[in-house]
Amino acid sequence: MEYKNEETKCDDNDVIMSLDDDNDSSDRKLFIKSNEEDIFITSPKNAKISKLINEILNADPEAGSNEDDPILLNYIESRPLEIIVKYMEHHNGCDDDIPERPLRSAEMEKILKDSWDAKFCDNLVSKDYQGNVKLLFDVILASNYMDMNELLYKLCAKVASLLKNKSFDEIHEILNDVRIDTLMT
């Protein structure tokens, strides 16, 4: 059983397989553990959009195959990992949608092709920016650690959309609760 270690490019004709055809099992589960000891379950196929997990599976195809021996992500808290697993589940192992730059709008549904992705990014931050901006940055750091570039670009576009056409005082208010030294702690 060998995992492909290549850039994931998707189109309507692609059939993405994370396992060799003769060994593929749609029932296979992948167990991933946060630094808070919470375990999240997905499939190897869904998780392959993380280059980090893909490399782990290339080195050890049985990694994370049972709850007693999950893939441990020491630098990721439970809430950001839960959000990333939800993203993996939606994309089913295939994501190649990178937002255009510069942003043509401050609205995510006008920036991203997938409306689910737009809602996903928007739901990380409440309308009043209270408390959720730190979560957005935690998910950005987690997606960077997991080497999920498409997600990283989408989340950075969300940050840019929050700041687009804002005054210094408005930007300060939005980012007030975010301090780099307190992220992911």
Image (spheres, helix red, strand yellow):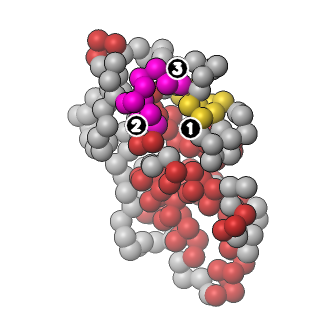
Give percent across and percent down for residue 125.
66, 60
Helix, strand or loop at mark 1: helix
Q: Label 2: few (<14), some or many (≥20) within 10 Å?
A: some
Question: Does residue 116 belong to the magenta stretch?
Answer: no
Mark 1 or mark 3: name the one nearer the start of the chain: 3
Residue type indicated by callout 2: Glu
Give percent across and percent down for residue 27.
48, 14
Identify the mark at residue 31; answer none if there is no mark. none
Instruction: Answer whether residue 21 is visible to the viewer in this image.
Output: yes
- Label 1 vs label 2: CA separation? 17 Å
- Relative to 53, is 114 above or below? below
Count the numbered circles shown: 3
- Relative to 155, is 61 above or below? above
Identify the mark at residue 85; answer none if there is no mark. 1
As drawn, the residue found furthest toward the top would be 22
Q: Residue at x 43, y 17 (%)?
A: 26
Q: Nearer the viewer, mark 1 or mark 2?
A: 2
The span shown in magenta is 53-64
Which residue matches tag 3?
65
Quadrant placement of the C terminus:
bottom right
Helix, strand or loop at mark 2: helix
Which residue matches tag 2?
55
Mark 1 or mark 2: name the one nearer the start of the chain: 2
Residue 82: image quadrant is top right
Q: Residue at x 53, y 25 (%)?
A: 64
